[in-house]
Image (cartoon, coloured by chain):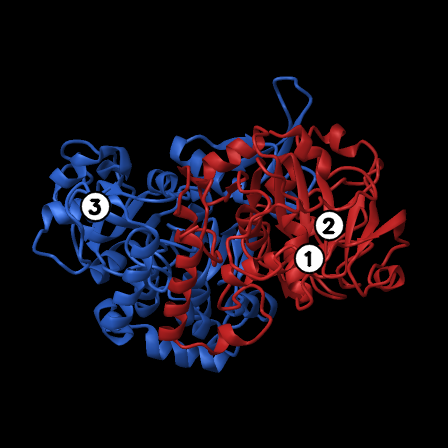
Chain colours: A red, B blue
Amino acid sequence: MSDDGRATGQGTGDAPVTQPADVEYPVAVERPHEPADDYSLTELLAVTAAKEIADGELAFIGVGMSLISGVLAKHTHAPDCQLVTESGYVGACPPGVVQSISDTVLGVDALVATNQLQIFTDNQRGLFDVGIIGAGQIDRYGNTNSTVVTGDDGTYERPKVRLPGAGGSTDIMTSCGRSIVMMRQQRRAFTTELDYRTAPGHLDGGDDRDAAGFRGDGPSAVITDMAVFRFDDDGEMVLSATHPGVDVDDVREAVQWDLRVADDVARTTVPTRGEIATLRTIDPTDTVLRGSDYVYEVGFDEWSERVMEHWKTLQDQ
Amino acid sequence: MSQTDDETGHDRAPRKPTGTATGPRSRRDKTTDLETAVAAYVTDGASVAFGGMGGRDPEAAAREIVRQEVSGLRVVDDARTTLFDVMVGAGCVDEYVGSWVGTSLISQGFNVRRAVEDAVPHHLAMRDVSNFGASLLFLAGAMDVPFVPTRSMVETDIPAHNPEIEVIEDPLGSGDDLALVPAAQPDVALIHVQRADPMGNAQIWGNVVNDHLKARAADNVVLTCEEVVPTETIRRHPEVTRIPGYAVDAVVEVPFGSHPWHCYGYYYADLPFYREYGQQSRDREDFLAWADEWILPHDEYREKIGADRLATLQEMEAQINDVPPVVGRSADRRDDGARGAPGEGGR
C-alpha cells in the first residue's frame, strides 16, 4: 500500500505523474526519452493510463486497454508494481500483450497463481492500491455502465445494445484503493443519465460513498482518447488535462452535462519514443493498439513467429 | 440456484450422494469418452457451469453439447467467452447467470448480442452479477448455505434486475448494507484441467479461476483433461490437486480440449482461429456455416486444425511457461517425446 502512490491520483487539476528521465526501456530505440512524433490516440491513451500506476503499487487490471497499460507500466517506469488479475495471477511480468484474463503470459514470473474468489476477497479487504476498468457509459460522478444501453424504447431484458457486463468493475470500484476509468470520449457515453449503474463511482456526490460503507475511494481519474479528468471534493468530474491537439471546447462538446473545468487545464505529456517503442513491442500484432488491420489479416504462421520473436525481446530483459 | 430448476421440472441426472466407499463417486475408474459423458450429464434444461475463463476453457465439451443439440440450458457461471457464444448461437441456451460475456479482444459476442437484443435464434435471458458475485455463487453452493454476503453490488442496478440478489442491512448491527449472493448448485459442471487420474483427482497448473468451487457446488462434475495419468503421478504433487476425486463423476482425456484457448503449460491460445470465429459470427448465416464446418467430434476437429498448427501452439507455450506437467510426463511416459520434455526435475 503506497500512500505516495495513492496521493498521485487525488485532487483536481493534478498533472499526470511525470516520467523520470532515467527510465530504462526494454527496447533499443534512438533518443528514447525524447517525445515521439508518431503515435496514435490509442497509444497516447495507453501510455497516459500506465502513468497512473506508481512504482511499487498493486495494480488490479482487467482485459484489453487496461492490461496493456499495466504491462507497459511494468516494463517502463514502474518495474516494481505488481499486476493483479481477477482470474488469479499476481505479480507477473508478461512479455507481451494479454489477450484474455487467463492468458498464460500472465503466468510468466508471477508471484501468485490462485483463484478468483481469493483475488476479490483480497480486493474487498482493501489490499490493492489502484484498479483500472473500462466502461460504456459514465456520468458526472464517475458511476459507470458496462451492462446495457437501453436506447429510447429498449429494456434491460431487450436492450438496444447488450454490453459484456460487470466483470470485475463493480468490485474494483467498490473496494479498490482508487480506480481509473479508461474509455472512448463520446457524447453519448458521457451521459447525464446512465441506462444502468454497473459500478459505483461517487454515487450522487458528497459523502455518499462513506455513507454506503465503501472501503475504496472510488474513481480518481477518467482517461479518454481526448482528455484526463479527475474528481473534486464533491466527487464531481473535472477536466484536468487535454491531449495534444484537443481544445477544452472539443471536450465540452463530447460531454452531455455542463462540464467542470480546472483553472489550469494541463496538456497531456506526449509519450516518449521509448514508451511507444515498448508499447509496440508488447503488441506486435496490433491486437490491442489497432493502428492497422494487421491482426485481422495476419496468417497463423506469421502470427506465431512474430509473437515468439517479440516475447523473446522482452524475456531477455 | 437449484430451486429454479426444480420449478421448471426439467429432467436431469439424479443428484449424487457424497463420496462414500460404495457411492457413485467412490474410488473407481471414472474414465469415459466425451460423447457418453455429455449425453449422460448435460440433459435438456439442465443448469450448467463451465471451468476456465479465457484460458483452460472446456471448449471441446461445449462443442460436443452443440453437436448433441442439447437445448434449454441455464448457464450459471462467471465470465464466459467463445464456448458460450457458440452455444447461444446454436440455440442451446435459454438463460445466463453470470458476470461477463464476450469472446476476445478482437471480436464481440455477436451471438449473445443477437439473442439478447433480437431474440435470434431465441431470446437469451440475462441475470447479471459481478465477478466477485460469480465466485460467491459457487462458494455458497460449495458450502451448501443459502447465501453469502458481500459489499459488492450495493448501490448498483445489479440487484434491481437480478431478483435473486437481495441487499440487506447487516443483521449483526454494523449498519453496513450487504448484498446476499444466493447459492448456485448447477446440475453439472464441465471443467478442463491439465491432468487427472482415473478417479478424477485433478491437477491444475496456473490460475484456478472458480473451478475448485464449481466442482464442489455442482451436483455432477465432468472433467476433461489433457492427460489421464496414473494415481502415483498425482501423489507426487498433491499440492496442485485442486479438485478431489470425491467431487467428480466422469473423467475424459481430451488433448487440446481448450483449443482455441490456452492451456497453461501445454499450449498457447490460437488467436487467428478465434479471430476467424469473431469475423464469421458477425452475421447469422456466416455463423451457421462456421458451425457446420467446426462442430465436429473432437478427434475430427483436431485433425482439421492440423498437427503442425497444434505443435506450434505447444512450442509457443513452452517458450513462456515450463511447468511441472512436463516433469510428470517425462517421469511417467519417457517414451512420449511429443513435447521434447526435459528430464525429470527440470524445474
Q: Chain for mark 3?
A: B
Task: Tell me where residue B305 appears, x and y as whole percent.
Answer: 29, 73
Left or right of residue B222: residue A139: right
Amino acid type of the residue tagged 3 in the rendering: Ala
Pick the front one: B335 or B193: B335
Q: Is residue B34 visible?
A: yes
Q: Secondary structure at mark 2?
A: strand
Q: Nearer the viewer, mark 2 or mark 3?
A: 2
Amino acid residing under circle 1: Met
Q: CA distance from mark 1 to mark 2?
A: 8 Å
Residue corresponding to mark 2: A222
What is the CA distance from the residue labelled 2 to the residue labelled 3?
A: 46 Å
Residue A110 on image: x %, y %:
41, 41
In the image, what residue occupies the spot 78% across and 45% down? Answer: A15
- Residue at image coords 63%, 56%: A46
Residue at mark 1 shares a chain with residue at mark 2: yes
| Tag of residue B196 | 3
